[in-house]
Image (cartoon, helix red, strand yellow):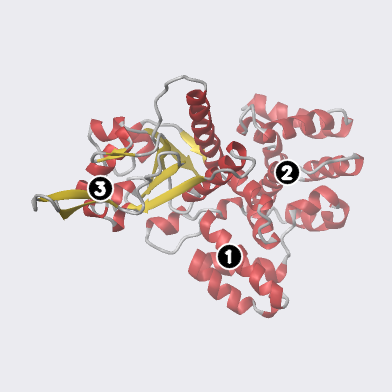
Amino acid sequence: MSENEKYQDKLNIPTLSIGTIKNLIKKELKYTIDAWDKGLDVDKQCFHIIGPAGVGKTEIMKQITTELTEELFPNGEEVFEMIMIKAPVLSRDDFIIPFPTKDEKTGNMSFEMLQSDFVPKDKDSCGIFVIDELSRGDHSLQQLLWQVMNEGSIHTHHFPKKFFVVSIDNPDDQEYSMDTMDDAAGLRRMLHLYVDVDITEFLKYAIKQQFHPFVVEYLQNNPDHLYDFEAQKIGRVFANPASWEKVSDHLMKYELQEPLKNNLDMIEILASGLLNNSEARLFVDFIKNKKTVDPKDVFFKYKKIKKDVMTLVKSKDNAALGELMNGFVTYLSTSQPKYKTIEKNNVIAFLCDMPIDTAAVFVSAIDGFKRDSTEFDYFLMLHITLMKNEVYKVNFNDIVLAIDKEK
């Protein structure tokens, strides 16, 4: 693989959001079980999820098992469980151990193959067997795990029929130490999917899980700060979805005791160890000052913060204006707030006040969403509603269209 070639390009596989992959795998497992229950003998599919560290690969496995338990067993009669193993810390001998036994009648010695505790044995059980960091396990372990992925068995022991196998990996890029399976046998055993970092997916999750508002607001204002790829490449501590979730947990714990502003020095130390010094300093400055225009305020009370926006416009602070516009689009796509006349007028006034090339991001965002997504539906309906207003149509939309034609 060339230095600049990405792993997903080398394998020529789909690049999807973490939410899309979660829904795909969950449906596949559920539909396979339903097909069996209806007498259709279909094969199990083994999945291989590849993506940057901290993007949420392990988390969606936990979510899948929780949700399938609720959906398949609404009365609590059974559990859709998850067994996870860490390939880098295991060897082949951790799975199958020959144990000498003596026949009491003949006195002859033989060997019985003992199975480890993490191998599913109950034939009526169901769940996911997750192999974490498959490509960082040694080759002899990978060969054994290939049998697990291809045949659902270890040696002569067969996994329960309703136990599915999912393997998880980091990409084979220069930032990771890997022992990849480049041969056709390794590749053919799995359905490969690549996870991309998606700020919209993360913020929807953060809002649903009630992350601390400072984390949500900061990332809505600074969506590019969700994952620090540059810091990761040079071996620094780097911001990522998992580390932001931990930062949120720390904020919640501290806020239970006293106002956060009494402990910002301690918060910065904790955040630095999770995000790195530079990102932590920016985040704590955001908490201290809150001078950044909040996208939520643009939507609900633009008149009160219009002066701050116009200060940025008059100073031609394009970087700050770009961040504000991206933050506004991110806020709308993740929160999808309801709107009446006041909110619609706020959006129109804001877009007309912003430099047209920056404000055009609002319209171009529509094309960036998948056509079957709730984000696309929300933006499209908002745009159609705003088009009924002559100010929006003439002073914003028509100008954007004219500029687009010139290009």
Q: Quadrant of residue 166?
A: top left
Identify the residue shown where x is 54% and y is 43%: 64
Q: Residue at x 39, y 38 (%)?
A: 160
Q: Residues within 10 Å of mark 3 (few under 14, many from 20)?
A: some
Q: Amino acid at mark 1?
A: Val
- Of residue 87 and residue 56, the one placed in the foreground of this image is 87
Q: Percent from the top left, x then y, of residue 192? A: 39, 34
- Asked whether the beta carbons under mark 3 and mark 1 sit within 8 Å of each other, the answer is no
Quadrant showing the C terminus: top right
> In the image, which disc is placed on residue 179?
3
Q: Is 336 in front, or is 291?
A: 336
Q: Secondary structure at mark 2?
A: helix
For the N terminus, the quadrant is top left
Mark 1 or mark 3, which is nearer the start of the sequence?
3
Which residue is tagged 2? 332
Name the kind of residue labelled 2 in the image. Leu
Q: Nearer the viewer, mark 2 or mark 3?
A: 3
**Which type of secondary structure does the marked residue at label 3 adopt?**
loop
> Mark 2 or mark 1, which is nearer the start of the sequence?
1
Disc 1 on helix, strand or loop?
helix
Q: Give how far apart the Cα atoms at labels 3 and 1 are.
A: 32 Å
Is residue 356 left or right of 183 when viewed as pictured? right
Report the residue marked by disc 1.
247
Q: Amino acid at mark 3?
A: Asp
Where is residue 263 drawn, in percent x and y? 65, 79
**Residue 344's x, y, as percent?**
86, 40
